[in-house]
Amino acid sequence: PAQPPGSTALKMATRKKIAIMTSGGDSPGMNGVVRACVRMAIHMGCDAYCVYEGYEGLVQGGNFIRKMEWHDVRGWLSEGGTLIGTARCMAFYERPGRLVAAKNMILNGIDALIICGGDGSLTGADKFRAEWPSLLDELVSAGELQAEQIEPYKHLNIVGLVGSIDNDLSGTDATIGCYSSLARICYAVDLIEATASSHSRAFVIEVMGRHCGWLALMAGVATGADFIFIPEKPRDDNWREDMCNVVEHHRKMGKRKTIVIIAEGALDRHGNKITPTMVKDLLADKDGLGLDTRITTLGHVQRGGTAVAYDRMLATLQGVEAVKAVLEATPETKTCFIAITENKIVRKPLMEAVQAAKEVAKAIEMQDFDRAMALRDTEFSEQYRSFIMTTAVQLDKEMLLPKEKQMKIGFINVGAPAGGMNAAVRAAVAYCLSRGHEAVAIHNGFAGFARHHGDKPLGAVRPFDWLEVDGWASKGGSEIGTNRELPSESGMETVAGLIELYKFDALFLVGGFEAFHAVAQLRRARDQYPSLCIPITLLPATISNNVPGTEYSLGSDTCLNELVDYCDKIKQSASATRRRVFVIETQGGRSGYVATLGGLGVGASAVYTPEEGLSLEMLAADVRHLKDVFAQDKGQSRAGRLILINEKASKVYNAKLIADILRDEAHGRFESRESIPGHMQQGGVPSAMDRCRAVRLAIKCIQHLEKFGGKTREEIKTDPMSATVIGIKGASVVFSPVKTIEEEETDWPNRRPKAAFWLEMKGIVDILGGRPSYKEPE
Ligand code: ATP
């Protein structure tokens, strides 16, 4: 089998046998977990095993526990479900079942177990770990095993990975699979919306989630649904009137479609079930709204097939982290699971998370809904508030700010279009309307703003129309138009004059590196033009994800999904025809983020980035490596391979040249082609994640601008927080002063942040792709 040459470098003192298992309901990304764990374990000099069919396999033993080789998991990243099977296992609920499982582990010499599953599976794991010493004693006293046999296994080393579509475990922002499921739901709702709008119908859409409303909530946020029902936040007794009021309000404003999303586990305050039929009857009631209403139950399509880019990333990074955790564990280490907080992968105590998940269920059962909500992660309650604030627009008068705090806010998109720009604008407009702010669109960036200047403004500056904006949740591109031009190019004096003319109290920018540059210019020009002494904030949106001050830009997730889809198809073609390497050129400007994360999502053989550059030696090493792997294939598998190269990775080598070199060097042993997805990477419909994050971050931006309501120009000018960029940095969402970011964190010539947080991931792509570690000669 093809083994990564790097594996010999990191031999462990004792060669561990690490087993991986998937359990509970299947979720997209589980195969990515198995691939990452198997390959990382082998890379670290361990033996990798898979336990087939979840705990059932552990109880059955025999052929259910199999040693895995490097090539056994090839291509698994793009497969849906779990290829090693999963099952509900009744026997494991009881001690005798767990006793046999313990014996099977010892007989196979397994010293560590990585379990990917939902809260049930992790509860089982926790119980198993707690009982382990007594299980071993029982095995010896019953004569099943000898005392010497159990000696090396005194301590059970378990690590959990949360694989579940429900996103129901406390302590992690996302579970492996939840964003794939959400993507399928949003896709379905988008389809339904078209027909609902055509016939002016209402649809009640039931989604999964017996105890957890994450899918329903996020689907509501991402699609701009009219109303949602989730278990954690049952509506008040008058939910019927509430819903009818909102729907009627939206209809009066001119909406032709009504979408209500209901989680399977939706309840009222007294614990009574709210069913889709109850909701439908209410919407259709002839004496009430009288809407032509249909119910759609999405069912198992939500289990979701192939994983979205984010789940592949999560599965891979968490799988690698799980193997590291196993190898670093001592008998004193608390059993952990691998979580993600915003953008940071972290280890957390398993027991506490399992306990907290149980508490949510208990709180719902006890009808202590505030507690249930409090036990969910911050993002959950924030998104719930986001949903309410962007749907019950102008219905809740308590949300209105006093007159003197209300602002006139200019919205402007700068740079290339990116998925989620419209969703951000929509959410911010809806929030502004709820608060009494005046939201004004500046069309076509600074270029549009300046060009239409004159005694009679030519319409580049227009107030938003709620009805029009409300349909933008799922729209790609930029509805208000975007342009790369900087204020200096449009004429700073003109721009400052227009801000004065329109009496803007604040500016909200959505865009990429140019937008960041624009904010920096506006801030610096404040001394000269007092009208620029207004709060300005930027929500980064660019597929390149190269805005300083954040690790994530809107649109980068949409781009990665497009790229991963494209690569999956190319890889299939490469495998089906003959032994072929495809060299794919990605966008990303001078940032290798897209190429690297794309490579992580498809399992690339090599990724070339501008940060690392590309030399003749490096290319030669990769050519040798590819020759080796194709030679080792011996024709038993016709797997295609991919190389990703960022458009600016090298001044000399491009996708075509590399493909030509490979073909020439292969001497007929394999084929090679180049392929350029180009602007396809901007994506059509934005991804569910970009849409959800757009809503959450856009509202935070307006809330940040609000803080300056009523402040003087001098106060604003001297406050560094009056010109900011919002970002996800590690485990938190933060506003950073543009002054600091532009002076300390920006690599201006290369138009990217100085520090690339994802560089570590590049190493993981190389390890899991089996690429020999390469070091440029001194
Ligand atoms: P999902 O999120 O899809 O429901 P899950 O992991 O919660 O996934 P469960 O069916 O609850 O799914 O659990 C999977 C398996 O884990 C069970 O079939 C059982 O073998 C084991 N298990 C669950 N709970 C326990 C428990 N309390 N004690 C022992 N084993 C358990």
Image: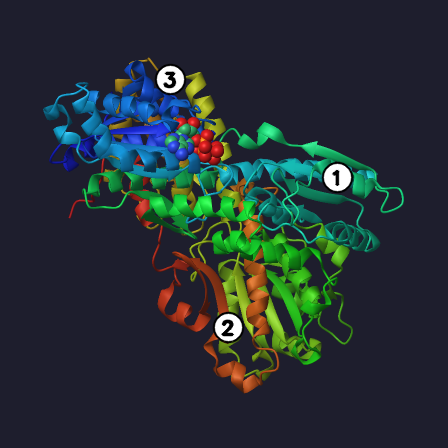
Q: Is residue 156 left or right of residue 12?
A: right
Choose mark 1 or mark 3, whichever is in front: 1
Query: On the rendering, which quadrant does ligand 1 occupy?
Result: top left
As drawn, which residue projects farthest toward the front? 141
- Is the CB of mark 2 within 8 Å of ligand 1? no
Q: Quadrant of residue 135?
A: top left
Which type of secondary structure does the marked residue at label 2 adopt? strand
Work out whether residue 126 or residue 44 is closer to the camera in this orientation and state it: 126
Sequence-wise first label, 2 or 1 = 1
**Residue under the point 32% across and 13% down:** 635
> Would you name the residue on which mark 1 appears?
278
Colour scheme in the image?
rainbow
Q: Which one is closest to the eye, mark 2 or mark 3?
A: 2
Q: Which residue is labeled 2 in the image?
A: 723
Residue 418 seen: no
Q: Residues within 10 Å of mark 3 (few under 14, many from 20)?
A: some
| Sequence-first disc among 2 and 3 | 3
How far from the left and from the top, in percent, is residue 385? Answer: 60, 58
Number of residues whose C-alpha sits closer than 10 Å to that of mark 2, classed few (under 14), some (14–19) or many (20 or more):
many
Give the mark count.
Answer: 3
- Distance of label 1 from label 3 (alpha carbons): 54 Å
- Type of the residue with mark 2: Ala
Task: Please give the residue where the numbered disc 3 appears in the rendered image.
Answer: 638
Question: How far from the left and from the top, in percent, is residue 18?
Answer: 24, 30
**Label 3's element?**
loop
The amino acid marked with disc number 1 is Met
| Viewer-closest of 213 and 191 | 213
Left or right for 373, reference 389: left
Above or below, 57 relative to 679: above
Which image quadrant for residue 386? bottom right
Residues 589 and 247: in front is: 247
